[in-house]
């Protein structure tokens, strides 16, 4: 059993949304609603459901009705009950695993690869940036090339970036890393103990989940509503799990594209501060808000006595091949993380850092056309899906480089298998969840040209028809693999 949480009856009713018992079989209606919540990841494996008595009281129905719903959930393999211990969401007959399996693009040269939500390097600027970095490269080549904390000018440039966003920062508060994933690994290595509980959004970035497990943490999911973050749900999760570490992606969340509202940011920071947990904020996609200016940095709400660490990177806004990221935090923690970094990769490559200096100097000039490009691609993707597969639901992402697409049936893993045979690689929803959640979703990138998008959707339509026409055969399970 993973580190689940106990759900009170009132909290479950809030998840039900505007659901109301019908005039027919109320038990079946309750069963269907809970099944759907499991399917879309808002009730994750290990979540303990309220007692039959408590749920019946909140719903205003008889206990016998709720008992019948729970019986049907157990019969369907979606609920487990142990006498005296309660009932919780079951893993079911799945291939789900707690193994720290990292996500990596899987497409081949014969496929259209929709697993990669990443932009190519901006060719308009690339050659000029390289030329401007060359003189400094000659200067640094005379030394040893190892700069554990990062090049002084890059640390200063990153610090100015935070200061300009309203978060006064010195170079001493910055550690340059080999991408944001390296920064997260350093945080985890410096903070976690074996068995430490880590609160994560659900869904979230697959390699973050894998890294947490790799460093001995136990992921505790806090489910996102379709509209975003519920501070009360985070408060309940903190109170019950007592985590050492909280990982969140408030800006252009991957995979949903949601942006955390301003008031929610302040409340989440306050919840983390009162809990004593380290709050680690992934800001990799901050500059790719598509409909409004970049949101207020979570660091602006930090208070004395708490550990808030901000992670950033140039891999999404510029190019994945430029492996430069950073961590912002208290100087004492930066020194501690640098000690860990010395045991992992010694230092971030000098040439990459010099190019990063030039990118940061012209960042808005570089990113503005990229945002316009993503907005156009977003509109094309949403319109193409609505026309080609109207059964799918696509909420327009507020930012980032991907869309979180709801299929309307728990077949994401099967669809990814069939899509492969049709010449298109997709990432199924369970990659972004814990214990096989999100079989009702896939993630699609906003990075395809119109011509490539049209061909990709034709192949996806063929795959979807094949999956849809075989759904009369019982699917392997409600949930898939991680």
Image (cartoon, helix red, strand yellow):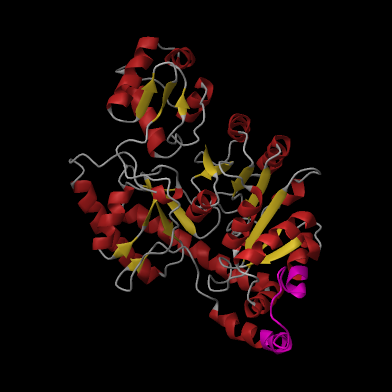
User: Is residue 198 visible in the rendered structure shown here?
Assistant: yes
Magenta residues, start to end? 132-156
Q: Residue at x 18, y 41 (%)?
A: 473
Q: Residue at x 53, y 26 (%)?
A: 11
* Front position in the image: 28 or 41: 41
Task: State left or right for residue 97 relative to residue 227.
Answer: left
Quarter of the view holding residue 351: bottom right
Quarter of the view holding residue 450: bottom left
Residue 324 in percent (x, y) is at: 62, 69
Quarter of the view holding residue 443: bottom left
Task: State left or right for residue 35 relative to residue 285.
Answer: left
* Front position in the image: 276 or 7: 276
Residue 331 in percent (x, y) is at: 79, 57
Give the position of the N terminus as an image quadrant. top left
Residue 282 in percent (x, y) is at: 61, 54
Residue 315 in percent (x, y) is at: 57, 67
Q: Is residue 405 magenta?
A: no
Q: How many marks?
A: 0
User: Is residue 260 visible in the rendered structure shown here?
Assistant: no
Q: Is residue 143 magenta?
A: yes
């Amino acid at each position: 059993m993973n580190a689940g949480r106990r759900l009170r009856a009132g909290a479950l009713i809030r998840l039900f949304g505007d659901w109301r018992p019908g005039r027919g079989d109320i038990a079946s209606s309750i069963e269907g609603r809970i099944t759907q919540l499991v399917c879309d990841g808002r009730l994750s494996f290990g979540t303990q459901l309220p007692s039959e008595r408590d749920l019946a009281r909140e719903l205003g129905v008889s206990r016998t009705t709720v008992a019948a719903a729970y019986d049907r959930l157990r019969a369907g393999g979606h609920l487990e009950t142990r006498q005296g211990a309660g009932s919780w969401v079951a893993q079911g007959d799945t291939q789900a695993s707690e193994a720290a399996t990292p996500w990596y693009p899987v497409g081949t040269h014969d496929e259209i690869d929709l697993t990669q939500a990443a932009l190519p390097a901006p060719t308009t600027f690339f050659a000029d940036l390289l030329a401007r970095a060359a003189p400094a490269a000659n200067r640094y080549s005379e030394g040893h090339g190892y700069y554990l904390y990062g090049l002084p000018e890059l640390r200063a440039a990153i610090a100015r970036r935070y200061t300009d966003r309203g978060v006064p920062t010195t170079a001493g508060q910055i550690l340059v890393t080999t991408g944001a994933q390296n920064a997260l690994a350093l945080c985890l290595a410096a903070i976690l103990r074996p068995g430490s509980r880590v609160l994560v959004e659900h869904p979230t970035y697959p390699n973050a989940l894998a890294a947490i497990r790799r460093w001995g943490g136990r992921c505790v999911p806090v489910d996102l509503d379709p509209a975003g973050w519920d501070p009360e749900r985070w408060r309940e999760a903190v109170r019950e799990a007592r985590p050492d570490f909280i990982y969140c992606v408030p800006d252009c969340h991957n995979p949903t594209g949601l942006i955390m509202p301003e008031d929610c940011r302040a409340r989440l920071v306050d919840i983390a501060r009162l809990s004593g947990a380290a709050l680690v904020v992934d800001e990799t996609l901050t500059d790719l808000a598509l409909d409004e200016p970049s949101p207020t940095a979570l660091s602006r709400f930090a208070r004395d006595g708490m550990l808030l660490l901000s992670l950033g990177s140039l891999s999404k806004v510029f190019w994945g091949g430029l492996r430069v990221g950073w961590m912002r935090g208290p100087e004492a923690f930066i020194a501690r993380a640098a000690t860990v970094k010395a045991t992992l990769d010694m230092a971030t490559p000098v040439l990459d850092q010099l190019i990063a200096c030039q990118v940061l100097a012209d960042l808005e000039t570089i990113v503005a056309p990229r945002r316009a490009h993503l907005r156009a691609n977003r509109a094309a993707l949403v319109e193409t899906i609505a026309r080609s597969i109207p059964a799918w639901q696509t909420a327009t992402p507020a930012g980032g480089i991907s869309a979180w697409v709801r299929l309307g049936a728990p077949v994401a893993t099967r669809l990814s298998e069939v899509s492969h045979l049709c010449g298109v690689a997709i990432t199924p929803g369970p990659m972004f969840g814990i214990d096989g959640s999100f079989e009702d979703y896939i993630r699609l990138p906003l990075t395809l040209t119109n011509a490539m998008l049209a061909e990709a959707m034709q192949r996806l339509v063929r795959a979807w028809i094949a999956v849809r026409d075989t759904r009369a055969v019982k699917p392997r399970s409600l949930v898939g693999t991680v």
